[in-house]
Image: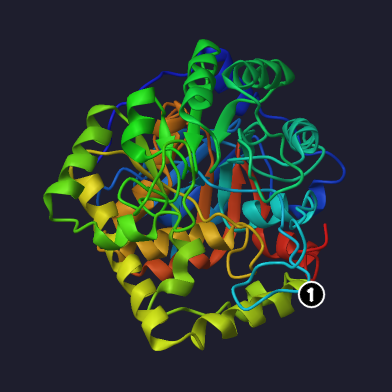
Amino acid sequence: MLAAAAHAREPDIASRILPPRAAPGEAVRPYVRVDAPVIVLRHVRVIDGTGATAQANRTLVIENGRIAAIGGPELAAPAGATVLDLTGRSVMPGIVGMHDHLYYIARPGLDSDGHAHGPSPLVPQMTFSSPRMYLAAGVTTIRTTGSVEPYADLNLKAQIDAGAVPGPHMDVTAPYLEGPGSPFVQMHLLRDAADARRFVAFWADQGATSFKAYMNITRAQLRAAIDEAHRHGMKLTGHLCSVTYPEAAALGIDNLEHGFWANTQGDPGKAPDTCPATVGAPTLAAMDPDGADAKALIARLVAAKVAVTSTLPVFEPSAPSYRPLSPKMLATLTPQARNDYLYLRTQALSAAPERKAARAKLWANELRMERAFAAAGGLLIAGPDPTGAGNVLPGFGDQRAVELLVDAGFTPLEAIRIGTLNGATYLGLADRIGSIAVGKNADLVVVEGDPSTRIDDIEKVEIVFKDGVGFDSGRLLDAVRGRYGQY
């Protein structure tokens, strides 16, 4: 399932994403359930993230933020260790979220398609609620995958890294690399290829550790951005439209967002460097995963070592079975965010039968394309894309991304690997995070039950260890009750 990353991370980039552990500060300690130099987890089921069969009744020793030993019930606890009896629980690697935003798209005056009236929706920052929600759900590392408040993201990362704020490790993606015609008034619009190169160089200097191209970028701008990002030892992903997947692969892109939903190579009337109004739907609808066109596209991506990010939660309204949010998830929303969610959910469920059928076909093709890509040796990674429609929330959406991979036909163990080790592999951090092994960071999630056989148990998070500090999931969620959608 894994493919080698096209461009290795420079060591300093990796260390900036995963800096040395910091002691929890005064504002973080109320969320901490266990923090000791040596912690022993006893009678726990270990799901190691590699896809291997889960191991029951294991003992795991955490020492100074790293996994020091793994053994059976006979493994002795070091003197003075804090021992937790986790009978009935499973431990898995912390989720590595590969499409995780720190903002919410405000949509006042929604129309029937969920679009906002006026020239542009605004994108307020969720600097308080999002990092707590990610950590509460077991997401210990995120890639922000496009920023609208880059200095807020960079400063928030610095606060988290210093132990002043609770939250996950962060790969901070620079502001979107976008061309003319963007609906977002907060985005810089690239003028030409030279501007793209300067833009990447500037944000690399400011501390960003990755880049994302957006829907209206031109091929020349994308090539310049990719070359400059690689010159700085960084990777570039893309939510594309004006540039097709084959074109992007030829230009050297590292990653493509939203599975195969954003590929426009077969859209009728597709003009070079222009995003068609159809934004990829005809291409996906016509893409028979077993056909020659799909096989050729997948072979091209695998040969070019282009990773693909599955973001199934953001497209779940197209699924024949569209699961509602749980009461625990709804409790995090502001009244306005809840109203937006319920309005859009009602619109999706009450759509005309022909529209539902068309969307269901896209959904089915997407699931099969992702399976085919992984089966061909492609690096499939996962994230939810929490952008403000209310149905995809930070953290909860990352869990749902793994669950929906099982709906796509992956086994629970395969889906967990995609959501953990595969993401770490793409980031160049698989030697530190993404799986459970002696010597790795103690970024771990303790859940009630067994997600290796019942994937929905991934939602039953009790303790989240980040760098060996055990956070209480319930306390983190209590802090954000009624706040997501406001700040």
* Residue 451 shows in this picture: no
Find the residue positioned furthest to the right. 26
Choose between 21 and 78: the one closer to the eye.
Answer: 21
Could you tell whether 61 is left or right of 470 in the image? left
Residue at position x 32%, y 64% in the image: 406
Residue at position x 63%, y 71% in the image: 114
**Label 1: element kind:** helix
Residue at position x 77%, y 40% in the image: 149
Spot occupied by residue 300 in the image (x, y as percentages of width and height): 23, 33
Could you tell whether 393 is left or right of 60 in the image? right
Choose between 258 and 159: the one closer to the eye.
Answer: 258
Q: Quadrant of the N terminus?
A: top left
Note whether 166 is above or below 481 in the view shown. Answer: above
Choose between 143 and 72: the one closer to the eye.
Answer: 143
Could you tell whether 383 is left or right of 341 in the image? left
Q: How many marks?
A: 1
Spot occupied by residue 17 in the image (x, y as percentages of width and height): 60, 28
Could you tell whether 330 is left or right of 406 in the image? right
Residue at position x 65%, y 67% in the image: 115
- The kind of residue on which mark 1 rests is Gln
* Residue 478 shows in this picture: yes
Spot occupied by residue 196 in the image (x, y as percentages of width and height): 61, 22
Note whether 205 is above or below 61 in the view shown. Answer: above
Q: Quadrant of the C terminus?
A: bottom right
Note whether 320 is above or below 452 in the view shown. Answer: below
Choose between 417 and 150: the one closer to the eye.
Answer: 150
Find the residue positioned furthest to the top. 231
Picture quarter containing residue 244? top left
For label 1, the residue is 336
